[in-house]
Image (cartoon, rainbow, N blue to C red):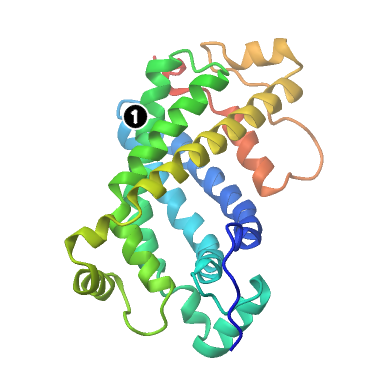
Amino acid sequence: MRIIKAVPVRGMSAVVAGAGPAHACFFATYEQSKHTLGHLTRHRHEHITHGLSGCLASLVHDAVSNPAEVVKQRLQMLHSPYRGVWECARRVYRAEGLRAFYRSYGTQVTMNVPFQAVHFVTYEWCQGRLNASRAYDPLAHACSGALAGALAAAATTPLDVCKTALNTQEATADGLVQAAALVLRTSGPRGFLKGVHARVLYQMPAAAICWLTYETFKHALVKTEGGGEDGAAKERTSTGVSNVGNVSGVGPPLACAALRLAAEVPPPTLTRT
């Protein structure tokens, strides 16, 4: 078996292939859930609404991204025998079947549900402190995203260790409980915090860039379809009147639909009566 030398960017193509559709589904689900739950609760329980919306978005996101995550982690192993994404996917499928790509799904959901709950609640809370008007503010979006990503990453590191154990071995463990027992047996209690610093350092810029990019495109879409600055101003009025989303023609792709939906939903702080 040929051993492929590890390099820092191995697995990047797997991330790129899975990130687009996964994040499109993620933000579409989040905005729709936040909009619906906000109306049902009359915006009286915003933290619960944000956290629950993040959890629902995570369920959809993980179903799309989990196979890419498996391929990425197998490529990133120190002495990975795989030369590329498609070779890795084919060999894993032939050797272990489709189940190999979803062996860690339960653990991924178990980790990402609390991760996204902490992430979104923290982000929205920071936005309320740094950007109370919920206007477009790149610095506030980036700082809020970085803090939210760091806190969520640190809190869920033990679950991430178990998920990685499931993704990078073939049959030693099957499920969260067995993975946790494997980590405890091989590394002791401190093994559950392995990589916490790297995980936080990764999630901080990743979350900051993600939220900044999302808010930037959301702001640009409001200005473009709302008639420039006048349309953007109209979108932010306290009456909640929106002139976005009335564009005729064929429906947009899912990622654009998420942005359109987000642009149509006034911030909770502006919709209270």
The x and y percentages for residue 170 are: 42, 83
User: Which residue is depicted at the point 42% across and 50% down?
Assistant: 56
The x and y percentages for residue 62 are: 47, 59
Using the image, determine if residue 217 lies above or below residue 72.
above
Residue 171 or residue 31, whichever sits in front: 171
Using the image, determine if residue 83 lies above or below residue 136.
below
Which kind of residue does numbered mark 1 sit on? Glu
Picture quarter with the N terminus: bottom right
Within 10 Å of disc 1 (Cα), the crowding (few <14, some 14-19, many 20+) is some
The x and y percentages for residue 253 are: 71, 48
Q: Residue furthest right?
A: 249
The x and y percentages for residue 159 are: 30, 59
User: Which residue is depicted at the point 63% across and 55% down?
Assistant: 21
Count of numbered marks: 1
User: Which residue is depicted at the point 48% across and 42% down?
Assistant: 30
Picture quarter with the C terminus: top left
Residue 51 lies left or right of residue 139; in this view the side is left
Task: Tell me the element at label 1.
Answer: helix
Q: Which residue is mark 1?
A: 46
